[in-house]
């Protein structure tokens, strides 16, 4: 899709939830390069402002930085409402992963994972799709993961929240396409981001990708189907895990990668 087509379909502003670092910052860069203005949300204000300034300088688009915690949806809704900007694209990238044995994970951690990974993308998709439907154009990208294709020990709750995003995006893709709104789940494998590199016990996974490549492949897939799986190795991996193997075998393979995480 040419930049002008992208702007027509998904401009004038894109909101990236979790847009200051890692994959979210890569999405923001790829969107700015296509000429669409940005609203970036993240918690740490310094890093958020630095990313916003860099993107403004490099791409000449307007970048609005708003410090917000996606765990507090009511406050996010208030802040976004106050901006009163026409948002044609939502990229929901922020996530929280309680890692470790289920018996060691606290209720607070589980509630936070549900708030950041389930409640916020669901309600933001509701909030922002309403004006998109009225305008007859727009796009929504929800970040999912290969971990959400089957049960994954030691990240069971995180993996389940990612499965939620895939299924939500599939349903909305079918429902909103006739209304002019493109919805897409990005079912990514391992990505070299600060978040991934911090995980203790994370093994170098085959097919690990650069954030910029994941963002580029995802934006290029918007409007072409309900799911994108960036990278050839990950496409094959998901096919094997979901179509060839039994659920029991898929969980066993996944547990070789995630069973040692803490
Ligand atoms: N990395 C991987 O290997 C991988 C694989 C598959 C799928 N994914 C998915 O890709 C997405 C991005 O992962 P990542 O590795 O790029 O993460 P990351 O490096 O940890 O970056 C996350 C971004 O989200 C922001 N953020 C985190 N929690 C937030 C919250 N509660 N409220 C607002 N902003 C928040 C961070 O800024 P602040 O900390 O300042 O808030 C940062 O800008 C996630 O949805 C993840 O599930 C990642």
Image (cartoon, grey):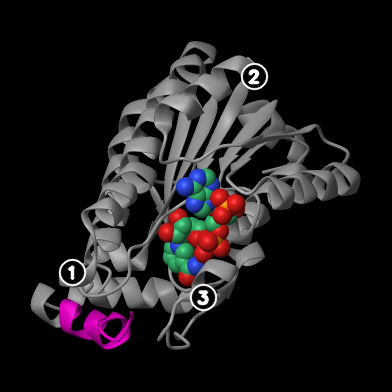
Q: Name the residue beneath numbered marker 1.
A: 102
Q: Locate residue 187, reporting x and y percent.
A: 40, 60
135 or 76, which is in the foreground?
A: 76
- Ligand 1 within 8 Å of the CB at mark 1: no
Q: Which residue is mark 3?
A: 198
Q: Element type at marker 3?
A: helix
- Can you tell which quarter of the image residue 26 is in? bottom right
Which quadrant: the N terminus? top right
- Which span is picked out in magenta? 250-262
> Mark 1 or mark 2, which has the lower sequence index?
2
Cβ of mark 3 under 8 Å from ligand 1: the answer is yes
Dot 2: what SS? helix
Q: Residue 125 has which mark?
A: none
Q: Residue at x 40, y 38 (%)?
A: 121
Q: Is residue 39 above or below residue 147?
A: above
Give the Cα separation between the discs numbered 1 and 2.
39 Å
């Amino acid at each position: 899709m040419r930049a002008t087509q992208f702007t027509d379909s998904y401009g004038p502003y894109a909101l990236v939830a979790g847009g200051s670092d890692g994959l979210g910052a890569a999405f923001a860069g790829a969107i700015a390069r296509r000429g669409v203005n940005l609203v970036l949300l993240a918690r740490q204000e310094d890093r958020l402002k630095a990313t916003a300034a860099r993107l403004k300088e490099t791409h000449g688009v307007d970048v609005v930085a708003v410090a917000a915690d996606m765990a507090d949806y009511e406050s996010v809704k208030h802040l976004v409402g106050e901006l009163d900007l026409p948002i044609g694209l939502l990229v929901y990238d922020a996530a929280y992963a309680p890692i470790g044995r289920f018996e060691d994970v606290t209720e607070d951690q589980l509630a936070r994972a549900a708030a950041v990974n389930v409640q916020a993308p669901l309600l933001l998709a509701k909030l922002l799709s309403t004006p998109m439907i009225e305008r007859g154009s727009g796009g929504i990208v929800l970040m999912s993961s290969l971990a959400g294709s089957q049960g994954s020990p030691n990240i069971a709750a995180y993996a389940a929240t990612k499965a939620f995003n895939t299924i939500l995006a599939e349903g909305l893709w079918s429902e909103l396409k006739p209304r002019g709104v493109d919805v897409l789940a990005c079912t990514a494998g391992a990505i070299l981001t600060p978040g991934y590199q911090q995980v203790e016990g994370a093994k170098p996974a085959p097919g690990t990708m650069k954030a910029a490549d994941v963002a580029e492949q995802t934006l290029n897939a918007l409007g072409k189907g309900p799911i994108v799986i960036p990278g050839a190795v990950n496409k094959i991996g998901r096919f094997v895990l979901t179509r060839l193997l039994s659920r029991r075998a898929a969980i066993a393979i996944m547990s070789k990668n995630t069973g040692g995480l803490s």
